[in-house]
Amino acid sequence: MSEEFFDVVNECDEVTGRAPRREVHARGLWHRAIHVLVFDAAGRVFLQKRSMSKDSSPGLWDSSCSGHVDSGEDYDTAAQRELGEEIGLLLAAPPARWFRIAACAQTGWEFVWVYRLQHAGPFTLHPEEIERGDWFAPEELARLLATEPAIFAVPFRLIWSQAANKTN
């Protein structure tokens, strides 16, 4: 497998360079990522349980789909690509942007665009990325986040806290 490269960005999310994934993470450099929250018609959100082989947050519940923006790629293209790679959802156009989160410790120094999509599945989960997936009602998710926050990836906890405050 070839090494991944990410664009390194400044505090304004402007590209200032390019570096390998391992260096970006080891040095805590600002870079870019996407998260997609997929809802069904009943308002439940589909979450993935990350594979135990993942280098960050293994075995934890996370957004429906998430991933880094590759060097030279834009956020929308990354969202579309990651949906196909992780949950087998091939879209003709990127999903709708919902809100943005500035790079911080909770995101792993990633500037994040969060996307929202309505889709009922079924999904084809990438076995090296995802152990399993499940649908969660917002009330159930709120209860679990309050009582068992450690079962969720840290970036997801931040994303959901902001998503819960947005109007549907």
Image (cartoon, rainbow, N blue to C red):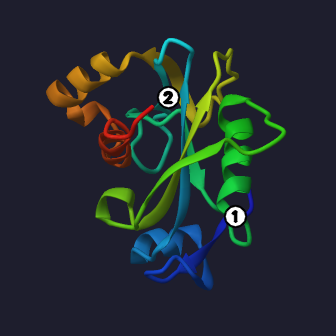
Nearer to us in this view, 160 or 8: 160
Numbered mark located on residue 64 in the image: none
* Quarter-of-image position of residue 119: top right
Query: Number of marks in the image?
Result: 2
SS state under label 2: strand
Front of the two marks 2 and 1: 1
Percent across and percent down for residue 26 are 42, 72
Numbered mark located on residue 74 in the image: 1
Numbered mark located on residue 48 in the image: 2
Q: Residue at x 73, y 29 (%)?
A: 88
Amino acid type of disc 1? Asp
Residue 108's place in the image compared with 127, above or below, is: below
Looking at the rendered image, the quarter that the N terminus falls into is: bottom right
Q: Residue at x 65, y 59 (%)?
A: 75
Percent across and percent down for residue 154 are 31, 47
- How packed is label 1: few (under 14 Cα within 10 Å), some, or many (20 or more)? few
Percent across and percent down for residue 34 are 56, 52
